[in-house]
Image (tube, helix red, strand yellow):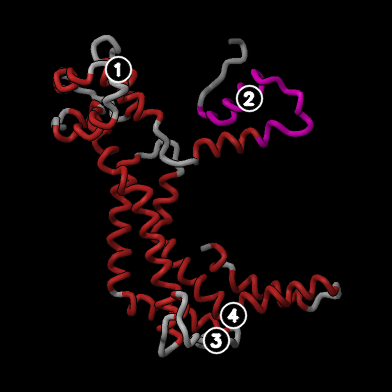
């Protein structure tokens, strides 16, 4: 998306580098300029930018520290509905994108040429087409749209019922939850539960406990802090699963970024204890540390 925003500036920069006195620089700039001006590059660029604009907010949400997987799954449902509508009315949607491509190419004095179609079809990219717009719609737009949709379904939809069921044990949600809504998580995690047969009774007591409380924890971590392991051993096990379940790789990636800043060749002799302490301070900067402790 950022590349498309900077596309005109990139063209100008490459045109200047093309006239460089350095032969190698001028040659590479000429090759890159010829590539990014071509319709085969611009059309996929516009398609990717358009489709990714629908998943941008989801991407940002998944990178937050306190991300909610159920909320993300619900947002995915909305994205999938939009993608399905685009798939159903693909001709109209791609026609709008094709107009954007035509404007971009006209500024660079380039044309959209219908690629050569093989007489004997062996690949999907050889779908017969009567126009360049129809060709790129069938061979690039629709396959990429289907790919994004399948990836979203594989990543979220298969686990949605389990995650939704698991979150029903959070105090703020358990007061309106039913036994049927938590059956999925109980059946799936039955092997790690201490007393699976007593879970329904335990959940009923857990639910009654929070019905009497005015202030109820809204997160799994807060619920875990308020869960007595002697009274609610099964509930505690499921809360531990929910707390440790990663939404994405954003959290470990933040740790890796911190380690890169700390573990340099100048500090290669840092001990493990000191390195762990510095990394935790770098990751959790919101926690005040008392040097005297």
Question: CA separation, marks 2 and 3?
Answer: 54 Å
Label 3 or label 4, whichever comes before in sequence order: 4
Q: Which residue is mark 3?
A: 106
Tell me if mark 4 has few (under 14), some (14-19) or many (20+) residues whose alpha carbon lies within 10 angstroms of its own. Answer: some
Question: CA separation, marks 1 and 4?
Answer: 61 Å
Please say if 147 is above or below 105.
above
Q: Which residue is mark 4?
A: 38
Q: Which residues are magenta?
A: 260-286
**Mark 2 touching mark 3, by CB under 8 A?**
no
Q: Which residue is mark 1?
A: 226
Question: CA separation, marks 4 and 2?
Answer: 49 Å
Q: Position of residue 171 (x, y in %)?
A: 23, 26
Residue drawn at (47%, 88%) of the image: 119
Q: Position of residue 181 (x, y in %)?
A: 17, 35
User: Which secondary structure, mark 1?
Assistant: loop
Label 2 or label 3, whichever comes before in sequence order: 3
Residue drawn at (40%, 83%) of the image: 134
Label 4 or label 2, whichever comes before in sequence order: 4
Q: Which residue is mark 2?
A: 278
**Can residue 99 be spotted in the picture?**
no
Question: CA separation, marks 3 and 4?
Answer: 11 Å
Question: CA separation, marks 1 and 2?
Answer: 30 Å
Label 1 or label 3, whichever comes before in sequence order: 3
Relative placement, left or right, of 189 versus 116 is left
Q: Position of residue 38 (x, y in %)?
A: 59, 80
Relative placement, left or right, of 63 versus 231 is right
Location of residue 47 by image quarter = bottom left
Question: CA separation, marks 1 and 3?
Answer: 64 Å
Q: Main secondary structure of the magenta part?
A: helix
Q: Nearer the viewer, mark 1 or mark 4?
A: 4
Residue drawn at (55%, 83%) of the image: 105
Quadrant occupied by the C terminus:
top right
């Amino acid at each position: 998306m950022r590349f498309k925003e900077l596309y005109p500036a990139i063209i100008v920069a490459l045109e200047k580098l093309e006239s460089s006195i350095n032969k190698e620089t001028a040659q590479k700039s000429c090759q890159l300029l010829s590539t990014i001006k071509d319709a085969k590059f611009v059309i996929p660029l516009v398609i990717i930018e358009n489709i990714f604009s629908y998943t941008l907010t989801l991407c940002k949400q998944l990178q937050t520290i306190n991300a909610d997987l159920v909320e993300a799954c619900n947002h995915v449902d909305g994205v999938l509905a939009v993608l399905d509508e685009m798939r159903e009315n693909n001709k109209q949607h791609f026609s709008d994108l094709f107009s954007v491509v035509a404007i971009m190419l006209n500024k660079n004095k380039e044309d959209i040429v219908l690629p050569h179609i093989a007489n004997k079809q062996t690949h999907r990219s050889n779908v017969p087409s009567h126009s360049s717009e129809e060709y790129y719609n069938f061979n690039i737009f629709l396959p990429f749209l289907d790919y994004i949709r399948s990836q979203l379904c594989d990543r979220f939809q298969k686990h949605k019922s389990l995650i939704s069921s698991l979150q029903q044990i959070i105090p703020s949600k358990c007061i309106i939850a039913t036994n049927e809504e938590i059956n999925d998580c109980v059946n799936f995690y039955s092997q790690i539960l201490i007393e699976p047969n007593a879970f329904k009774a335990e959940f009923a007591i857990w639910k009654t406990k929070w019905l009497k409380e005015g202030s109820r924890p809204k997160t799994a971590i807060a619920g875990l802090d308020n869960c007595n392991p002697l009274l609610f051993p099964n509930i505690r096990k499921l809360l531990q699963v929910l707390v440790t379940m990663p939404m994405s790789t954003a959290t470990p990636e933040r740790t890796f970024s911190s380690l890169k800043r700390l573990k340099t060749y100048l500090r290669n002799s840092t001990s493990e204890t000191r390195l762990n302490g510095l990394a935790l301070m770098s990751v959790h900067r919101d926690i005040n540390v008392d040097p005297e402790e």
